Amino acid sequence: MKHSKFLRIGAVVAGLSLVAAACGDDDDAATTDDTNAAPSEEVAEYSIAFVGPLTGDAANLGIFIRDGATAAVEQFNEEHDDIEITLEEFDTQGDPAQAPTVAADYVNDDSILGLVGPAFSGETKAVLPTLEENGLVMVSASATNATLQDTVPGGKSFHRVLADDAAQAEGLVKYLTTDLQPASIAIIHDNSEYGQGLAVQQLATQLAETDIEIVATEAIDPDSEDYSAAVNTVKTANPEAIFFGGYYEEAGTLAKQLKDEGVEATFISADGSLDLGFIESAGDAAEGAQISCPCNLATTNSPGALGEFATAYEEIIGSPPGTYSTEAFDAANILMTGIAEGATDRAALLEYVEGLTDVTYAISKDVVFAETGNIEARGIFLFEVKDGEFAPLVATDDL
Amino acid sequence: MGSIYALIALGYTLVYGVLRLINFAHSEIFALGIYASAFAIEGWLGVTGTRTGLGLVGTLLALLAISMLVSGGAALLMERVAYRPLRRRNAPRLTALITAIGISLVVQEFLALRYGRSKITPQRLFEKESLFTFLGEEVRNDKVLVFVAAIVLMIGLDQFVRRSRLGRGIRATAQDAETAQLMGINIDRVVMLTFLLGGLLAGAAGFFNLIFFESARFNIGFLPGIKAFTAAVLGGIGNVRGALLGGLLLGVLEKYGAALFGGQWTDVFAFVVLVLVLLVRPSGLLGETLGRARA
């Protein structure tokens, strides 16, 4: 983003010197102009923007999203000779406080027609009014807060290609009651808005109405390495399953400390833990852990289009896809298909995405947009750690 | 955990005893020790799997030495670069305190920028197994190792300060710096020695912390640092045995607090006890006695 600013300044300087040169020698300047103008008549150039964290604590998540979109863009450009899409990157560090500053950069860049992102719920909330004002369409691959669609009542910009946090708890309850069926469960969370919200407000409340007994509720401090207090309580309560609401680094450390203390219960966590960082930090203790996500993680041995995407992604990016890469691929494809169908300015693309209902080419899941910009599907996906990798376990829609 | 607090607490206590300075950057010395052993495991020693027998003992000792040297060196450097100039100019203690906080931030951000803000997780050195059961609690081999090693180090330090010539210098300086100087003690050397000792122990604590938790993060020093400082106050700051007692006690308190009230209340319980203790004994359990002459 900084680079492009420098480039622009550079271009202005270069332009000025051209003008200066032109004053001296008219003929030369005219010929340069002709050669520059020629190719743009054949290939139409448009940009879409990735908005999310590329540096900072949450950079891992943002990078997977960007790379999912990059894979989509590269494939699209290869298939289309007459259109060239550029993916511009805007790094927000996932920080709601920085998001509006960054937003000014892409909102004022007229070449950008739509956004893949913003990545997180907080930053999405912060910039949605601005997007709405400027008629800029957004398709988030990862923002899951359950109230985002109400940020701007009746707004048109907001879209996302995955179910929200409330759906994740519903899906988890469905999985626990119909498939895994543990007699007892312990709930641990990290006191974050996300972790505690999902584990306590959502999951524990819904589990209270089922036969599964909650035998312990514990919190850990993400700033500490020592989870022995929670681990000991859980060990004493001796549950058949453990649910952790929080992020992958803590999840890894926690899983390891639980196993070291001899706790054998099934370790279950949610999308915040669906990252290779979890397996890395838990080591052997990650084996058999079950992670849920409203996103559909693609691996090279996934069936059908998902597997093809994972293979293509690895070829283009050089590493396997991660959390939300599949969703980012879908989000970018929605925008680019619109552009290919002639929606080549912001207003037209906004209308195009607003008009979409069933996105037949989405590979992550059935993407059918509701009026609000949410998707209709409420199902989530579960993955299991096998041999140090995430393997698909079950989709709650199939239960 | 208590023995790790105690090791760090010793650093606070020594420096405070001699200089009446609370060295808030001490927690970063501890963090540097953790990072040193983390990188030593994978980088310098190239450990790729768990080890057993003599190989394990050798690796552990080498790591302990590396970690202690790095932390000790960092503490010396810190004293030389930041504190000595202040002392030379007779700067008020408040200035030194601010310097300490500044150094702490600098080191933290350095670790964050250089090695990233996310956790680093080095290779596990040995399998953790429970050895025996004590009072209904399973006792794990890594806990025993850390506890025993820490106690040995602490006894070593205690004896060093009480018996050796250099230790006598430290005690004399703590008691009355000016008179000590008149008696031919080189204050600069005593201060350096104090920082070095504190640093070495913090390095050992860092290494034990790593063995125990097998992960490190740029701000890892902060929380144990605060807790260790608390432990030092609890036992009586400026008092070597007080730091020892305070650290172990704090570890035990946390454990019982967690068992009685649940994990979320660990810190509340521990600190409420601290406040109560200080109400009854404002100078800590064993008082401020680093300088007091013991015949």
Image (cartoon, coloured by chain):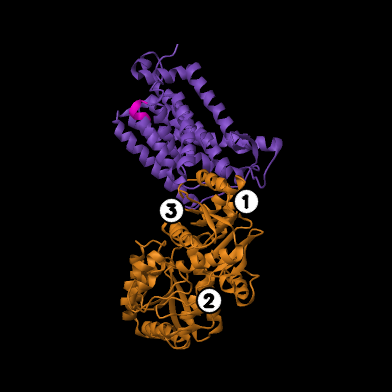
Q: CA distance from mark 2 to mark 3?
A: 36 Å
Mark 2 and mark 1 residues within 8 Å of each other at the beta carbon: no
Disc assigned to residue B50:
none
Of the residues shown, which amino acid type is indicated by label 1?
Glu
Circle 3 Cα neighbour tier, 10 Å, few/some/many (<14 / 14–19 / ≥20) = some
Please give the letter of the chain rendered in purple. B
| Magenta part of the chain | B277-283
Nearest to viewer (mark 2 / mark 1): 1
For disc 1, the marked residue is A264
Chain where mark 2 sits: A
Badge 1 element: loop
Q: Farthest right residue?
A: B53
For disc 2, the marked residue is A72
Please give the letter of the chain rendered in orange. A
For disc 3, the marked residue is A191
Residue A33 in the figure: left or right of residue A366:
left
From the viewer's perspective, is residue A126 above or below residue A341? above
Of the residues shown, which amino acid type is indicated by label 2?
Ala
Q: A340 or B182, which lies in front?
A: A340
Residue A283 within the segment the image draws in magenta: no
Chain where mark 1 sits: A
Of the residues shown, which amino acid type is indicated by label 3?
Asn
Residue B140 lies, in percent from the top left, at 61, 38
Residue at the spot 51% in from the left edge and 69% down from the top edge: A294
Circle 1 Cα neighbour tier, 10 Å, few/some/many (<14 / 14–19 / ≥20) = some
